[in-house]
Structure formats: structure tokens, C-alpha cells
Image: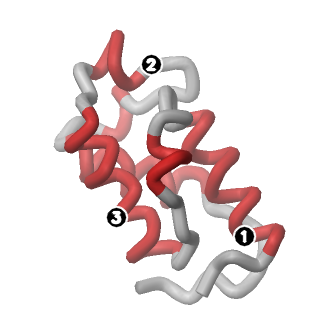
Amino acid sequence: MADHTDTQLDVEELRTVVAGALELPVEEVTDEARFKEDLDVDSLISLEIAVRVEEHFGVKIDESQLTEMGSFQLVRELVEAGLSTGSAR
């Protein structure tokens, strides 16, 4: 896991982690792309995104937040909130 003790998020690093979980090229993971409708993300893949983000950034995303992860922008907001509130490990 990378050391992310500050509150600054490298958005492109996050985009790379999410793209890896989705097994898609980074270019397809745009801020506007909707996971379910545009990228065919199901609940299992959402869980994989959450696990990879948690492992990489140390930000805990609980199960209730999984349903909120409808786009890269929403994942970014969850990670930024986690980093700013200190929920990162």
C-alpha cells in the first residue's frame, strides 16, 4: 500500500487503480462515465474497486458506500472525504 498520510489525492493514480479493477484502459475511466450504464460495472466489480482503493490508499469504504460509487467522480469524492477526515489508515 502506498503511503497516503496527507490529504492530497493524486487523481490520476486513483484513476489507474480504478481502471485496473475494471480491467479497462485508463482513458475509458472518465469523470463522467457511469459505472453501471457506461462501463458495465456490477456489484462484484464495485466491491473489487472498493478493495483496491482501500488497499492502495488506506481509505475504508464501507458496504453502504458501495452503492454510491456510480462513477469515477463519486469514488474520488469518497476517497477525498476519507483522506480529509482521517479515515485513512
Residue at x-position 61% and y-position 34%: 73
**Residue type at the position of mark 1:** Leu
Residue 51 is marked as: 3
Q: CA distance from mark 1 to mark 3?
A: 16 Å
Camera-nearest residue between 34 and 27 = 34
Spot occupied by residue 25 in the image (x, y as percentages of width and height): 26, 37
Spot occupied by residue 78 in the image (x, y as percentages of width and height): 65, 51
Query: Number of labelled discs?
Result: 3
Q: CA distance from mark 1 to mark 2?
A: 23 Å
The image quadrant where one finds the C terminus is bottom right
Establish if 84 lies above or below 88: above
In the picture, measured across the screen, residue 64 lies left or right of residue 22, that is: right
**Residue type at the position of mark 2:** Arg
Q: Earlier in the sequence, mark 1 or mark 3?
A: 3
Residue at x-position 45% and y-position 19%: 34
Camera-nearest residue between 65 and 2 = 65
Mark 1 Cα shell of 10 Å, populated few (<14), some (14-19), many (≥20): many
Q: Earlier in the sequence, mark 1 or mark 2?
A: 2
Spot occupied by residue 82 in the image (x, y as percentages of width and height): 70, 65
Identify the image quadrant of residue 27.
top left
Q: Residue furthest top?
A: 37
The image quadrant where one finds the N terminus is bottom left
Q: Are marks 1 and 3 in contact (CB under 8 Å)?
A: no
Mark 2 Cα shell of 10 Å, populated few (<14), some (14-19), many (≥20): some
Label 2: which secondary element:
loop
Residue 34 is marked as: 2
Residue at x-position 24% and y-position 42%: 45
**Residue type at the position of mark 3:** Val
* Residue position for label 1: 83
Q: CA distance from mark 2 to mark 3?
A: 19 Å
Of marks 2 and 3, the one in the foreground: 3
